[in-house]
Amino acid sequence: MSWTVAAEELCRYGRSIFDRGLTHGATGNLSQRLADGFLMTPTGANLGQLDPGGLARLDSEGRHVAGPPPTKEALLHLAMYRRRAQAGAVVHLHATHSVALSALADLPADDLLPPLTAYYVMRVGRLPLVPYFRPGDPRLADAVAEQAGRHHAMLLANHGPVLAASTLAAAVDATEELEETARLFLMLRGQRLRLLSEAQVADLRATFPPP
C-alpha cells in the first residue's frame, strides 16, 4: 500500500470512529505499518478532522521523518509493532464503555471480560489489563510490550483499549467488538450470566484464531 492510499484510509477510519462516538475530542490515535515505515495520527489530533497531508511519518526504526509530530503514544504503537511482526495497524481509543471497564477494581487483570459472545472470542480473545501510567510515559510502552507478544488486545487502566491487527479494518472491527462487549458486560453486571463453555471457547479459538 502506498503512503497516499494509507493516509486516505487512515483519515476515513478516523472520521468514522469519531462520527460514531467511539472516541471524543482530541483523543485516540491510529497508525499503520508500511513497507518502509509507519504512518500515525499527529499529537493532539481530532480523529474526525484528520487531513491525509497532515499525518506523521516515521521511518522503519520509528524516527519521525515528515509531517507534524506523531501522537504522544507513538512509543506505545511502536511497542506493539515490534512484538507483533504481522501487525499492520494499531488502534488506541478512549471508547466510553471500554474506559469504564478499565476503571473497575474487582476484575481479573489477566483477562477482564468473560466469553459473552462468539465474536468477542473470535476478534478479541483474551483481554489483559495494563497498569496505569500517564499518557506518553515510556513506561506505558514498556508495559504494553510485556503483553504484546501474547495478546493483540489489551486495556490500559483508567485510559482505554489498544488493539493490533493485520489491517486497519481488522483492528477497528476488533476495537468495536471490544467496546460493544464492554457495554454488554456493564449492562449485565450483577445478573446471572450464561457464558460460552470452555469447550465452545476452545472450538472458536481453534477455528478462528484472534488476529
Image (cartoon, rainbow, N blue to C red):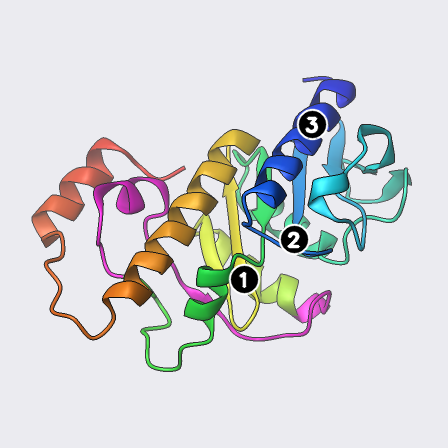
Percent from the top left, x then y, of residue 73?
Answer: 71, 57
Determine contact: label 1, label 2, CB under 8 Å.
yes
Type of amino acid at the residue the image marks with label 3: Leu
Magenta segment: does it hold 97?
no
Q: In the figure, is residue 189 to the left or right of 78?
A: left
Q: Amino acid at mark 1?
A: Gly
Q: Is residue 41 left or right of residue 79?
A: right
Instruction: Name the residue rendered at 75%, 32% in the picture.
Output: 37
- List x then y, in percent, for residue 153: 45, 51
Q: Secondary structure at mark 2?
A: loop
The residue at which mark 1 appears reads as: 160
Residue bounds of the magenta highlight: 114-139
Q: What percent of the width, then of the height, locates residue 160? A: 54, 62
- Image quadrant in which you'd find residue 34: top right
Within the image, what quadrant is residue 58 found in?
Answer: top right
Mark 3 or 2: in front is 2
Confirm whether residue 35 shows in the render. Answer: no
Query: Which residue type does callout 2 highlight?
Result: Gly
**Disc 1 to disc 2, C-alpha distance:** 9 Å
Determine crowd level at label 3: few under 14, some 14-19, many 20+ residues with C-alpha closer than 10 A. some
**Label placed on residue 122:** none
Question: Label 2, on which residue?
Answer: 28
Rendered view: 24 above or below 60 = below
Q: Position of residue 43 (x, y in %)?
A: 81, 53
Spatial CA distance of label 3 from label 2 is: 20 Å
First in sequence, mark 1 or 3: give its number: 3
Magenta: predominant secondary structure element? loop
**Which residue does the image show at 77% across and 22% down from the upper left?**
3
Q: Nearer the viewer, residue 197 or 149?
A: 197
Residue that numbered label 3 is attached to? 34
